[in-house]
Image: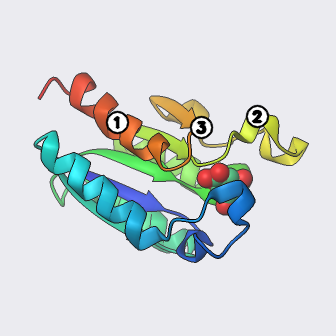
């Protein structure tokens, strides 16, 4: 079983970017943790990051053809703005779990609204890197694999 993790804009700067909010780990370290936990769970994981809305939409649309059974997505700021990413998630018919490092419900008002959450299976928000690992474990249970 293959799970795709998509990191949205500015997450390539993790470790340097507002560490008091997003932690001190780099994206590379987070991806390593995802891959390792995936191996323990016998899930094959692929991690991608993009600063471009269209590229994220292409990855979502192609995920089924690429053989992925589920998607973990941190849409980052696109969470709050992108009807196009929301529509892509709704269109593809694959289970998608939305993830956030910070607890978006405890932050600025504009972050408390997610345009994408309603078309995802669920959201895991506020646990730092652990949010991604909980999403992987959730897929293990959900997909019964
Ligand atoms: C984020 C929260 C978003 O509001 C923000 O724009 C991000 C990261 C998080 O993981 O906490 O870039 O998605």
Q: CA distance from mark 1 to mark 2?
A: 23 Å
On whether ligand 1 comes within 8 Å of the CB at mark 3, the answer is yes
Reading the image, the residue beneath label 3 is 125
Reading the image, the residue beneath label 1 is 95
Q: Secondary structure at mark 1?
A: loop
* Quadrant (top left, top right, bottom left, bottom right) of the C terminus: top left
Whether residue 101 is visible here, answered yes or no, is yes
**Up/down of 8 relative to 140, above or below:** below
Q: In the rendered view, does 87 fall on the left or right side of 35? A: right
Reading the image, the residue beneath label 2 is 105
Residue 106: x and y in percent read 80, 36
On whether ligand 1 comes within 8 Å of the CB at mark 2, the answer is no
Identify the residue shown where x is 46% and y is 69%: 27
Q: CA distance from mark 2 to mark 3?
A: 8 Å
How many discs appear? 3
Asked if the residues shown at circle 3 and circle 1 are in contact, with their CB atoms under 8 angstroms apart, the answer is no
Which residue is nearer to you in this view: 23 or 70?
23
Q: Nearer the viewer, mark 3 or mark 1?
A: 3
Residue 46: x and y in percent read 25, 62
Q: CA distance from mark 3 to mark 1?
A: 17 Å
Residue 14: x and y in percent read 58, 70
């Amino acid at each position: 079983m293959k799970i795709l993790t998509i990191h949205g804009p500015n997450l390539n700067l993790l470790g340097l970017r507002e560490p008091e909010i997003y932690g001190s780990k780099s994206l590379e370290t987070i991806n390593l943790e995802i891959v390792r936990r995936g191996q323990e769970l016998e899930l094959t994981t692929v991690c991608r990051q993009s600063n471009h809305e269209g590229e994220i939409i292409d990855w979502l649309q192609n995920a089924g053809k690429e053989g992925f059974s589920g998607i973990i997505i941190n849409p980052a700021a696109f969470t709050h703005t992108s009807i196009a990413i929301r529509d892509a998630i709704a269109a593809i018919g694959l289970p998608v779990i939305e993830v956030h490092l910070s607890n978006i419900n405890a932050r600025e008002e504009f972050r408390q609204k997610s345009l994408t959450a309603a078309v995802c299976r669920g959201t895991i928000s506020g646990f730092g890197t652990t949010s991604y690992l909980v999403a992987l474990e959730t897929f293990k249970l959900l997909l019964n694999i």
